[in-house]
Image (tube, grey):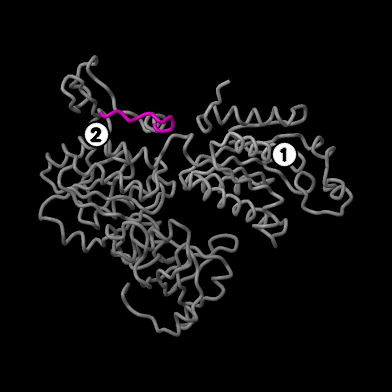
Amino acid sequence: MNGSVLPEDVLRDAPSFTPRPYELADLELLLSGAYAPLSGFLGRSDLDALRRTGRLADGTPWPVPVTCEIPGEVASALDPADPGRRTLVLTDMEGAPVAAIEVTDVWPTGENRFGIGGPVRRMGDGGHGPFQRLRRTPEEVRALMPPGRVLGVIADRPLHRPQLAQIAHAARTLAAHLLILIPVSGPGPDGLPPEALVRSIFAARDRMPPATVVAVPVLTRGDEMRDALLRARVAAAYGVSHVLSTGDTLSGAGLRVLVPRELAYDNRDGQWRWRDDIPPRNRRLAMTPAEIDDLLDRGFPLPEWHTPPAVARELSRVRPPRRHRGLVVFFTGLSGSGKSTIARNLADAMRENGDRTITLLDGDVVRRELTAGLGFSKADRDRNVRRIGWVAAEVGRHRGMAVACPIAPYEAARAAARRMAVEAGAGFVLVHVATPLEVCESRDRKGLYARARAGQLRGMTGIDDPYEEPVDAELTIDTTTMTVPEAVEMVLGHLVENGWVEPKLG
C-alpha cells in the first residue's frame, strides 16, 4: 500500500499540511515498515477497539494509538466519500512533500482540531538530512542480520565506558549480534543534536563488539510508557530479540528485556565490574549526566577512566564551554519597564569587551524590520515572539550572543523561544524586568498607557491584555529604584557567575 501511486491530477489538486514533529516521526516509521502491520494513521474504529481491548479493530495486537491531527481549515477541504477530495499531502518542516494520506475517516478532537485516519503512501525521494545512509528500513536491516539472537540497544545518549562495558557483557552472555538503534528525530535527553549523537556513538564503535548501526526516527512525547511501548515495537520490527534497558522501561512486542546491574570502576586494575564486587575504597561510581554536563560547561576534560577519548573529543566539540557557546539573553517585561534600555546597554558593554559577537533584537526595530505587518492580537504577538526566538536561536547556533527585549507577555511563546535556543545548542537566560505597572505607567515615554486609559488603544499589555509573569526566569530585576548601570552590572554578574562571560580582572 505504501508504494502504490495516486493519480497525478489528484495529487496536484490535493491540499497539503505539515504535521507536528512527533507525527512526522510516526509517518516515517509507517512508511519504512517499522510500525508494521500498520499502513497508516489509525481511524476511530481502530482507536475505539484499542482503547477497549488493546487490539486493533481486526484483532491485531498493537500497543498505543498512532494518530494525526489537522486544523479545521484543512479538514474542511477533505471528504472521505469523494475519491477526488480525500487525499492530503503531508509535508516536512520545510514544505517538501513526504507522503500522501488517503483519508478514510475525519472526526473532531478539540477546538478547530480534527483527527484523520487512512493509509499513507510515500512521495518524493525518501527524505534528506545527515546520515541518510543509516536510515535503513527494517526489511533491509533484517536481511543483514546473522541468524540467532539480536541484542538491541536504543542509544539516545552518548556511550561512556560503563555503558560500553554493559553492552559488551550482555552481547557476550547472549552470544548475540549487536544492533544499535539511534533516535534521530530531535535532540536527546542530553540536548545533543541528532547528528552529534550519531557522531558520538561512532566515536565509541571501536570499544563495542561488532555491531550494526541504524538511525531511527523515534521521538519522545513526554509519555514514558507510550514511548517505551513504541520503541519496543520498532526494535522488534528491526529483528531485535533482546533489548538492553538504558534507563527507560521497555516492554511489549515479545522482547526479552535485560536490566543490567550497576557497574563501577575498579581502580585496582582499571576495569568496570559489578559495583558490589569492588571494595568501597577501590570503587568509583559512574558519573551522572549532570556531572558530565558540568565538566563540559566549565571547559574541563572528561576523565579517561570514564569516557573514551574519542567520545570526549566529540562531546567537547558539540558542547564547548559556556564562555564559547552561543547564548540568548531574553528580556521580558511591561512597556516602560526598562528592558530595552538595559538590553541596549548590555549589548554595548559586551561589544566593548569584544569577547562575543552581539546581535541586538530590540522589540521596536524587530517590529519594523522582521515582523512588519503583524498586529497586536494574541496570535500575532505569539508569532512576533516566536520569530524573534527563531532568529536568536540561529545566532546562538553559530556561537554568537543574541540580546532580545520584546514584551513577550505569554508564557507559551517564551517557552517556545527557550526551546528553540536549547535545540540549537545555545544557552538561554530569561531576564524578567519586573518593574511594577504603576511605575511603568508613570514613565510612559511613548504615551501608550495614556491612550489605553483613554480608550484610544486596545490590547495594551497590563491594561486590557494580560502579562503572564514568568516563573522560570533566571534573573529578576525591578528598575523602580535601580539605575541602568546597576541593572546592567546585575545581568553581567549573572552571566559571569554562570560561566557565560569571562570575568574581567581589575
Q: Position of residue 402 (x, y in %)?
A: 58, 44
Question: Where residue 8 is drawn, which disc sits there?
Answer: none
Residue at 50% in and 72% down: 16
Amino acid carrying label 1: it is Thr
Compared across the picture, whether 490 is left or right of 143 comes to: right
Place residue 59 in its image quadrant.
bottom left
Q: How many marks?
A: 2
- Residue 92 belongs to the span the image colors magenta: no
Q: Position of residue 113 (x, y in %)?
A: 55, 63
State which region is magenta: 296-304
Q: Position of residue 127 (x, y in %)?
A: 36, 65
Residue at mark 2: 161
Q: Main secondary structure of the magenta part?
A: loop
Quick one: label 2, few (<14), some, or many (20+) residues within 10 Å?
many
Quarter of the image where the C terminus is located: top right
Judged by depth in the image, the label closer to the viewer, 1 or 2, is 1
Place residue 203 in its image quadrant.
top left
Q: Earlier in the sequence, mark 1 or mark 2?
A: 2
- Residue 301 belongs to the span the image colors magenta: yes
Compared across the picture, whether 34 is left or right of 191 comes to: left
Amino acid carrying label 2: it is Arg
Q: Nearer the viewer, residue 489 or 449?
A: 489
Secondary structure of residue under mark 2: helix
Q: Position of residue 60 (x, y in %)?
A: 29, 62
Quick one: label 1, few (<14), some, or many (20+) residues within 10 Å?
some
Asked if residue 432 is positioned above or below residue 282 in the image, the reply reads: below
Question: Where residue 341 is drawn, which disc sits there?
Answer: 1
Q: Nearer the viewer, residue 191 or 368?
A: 368
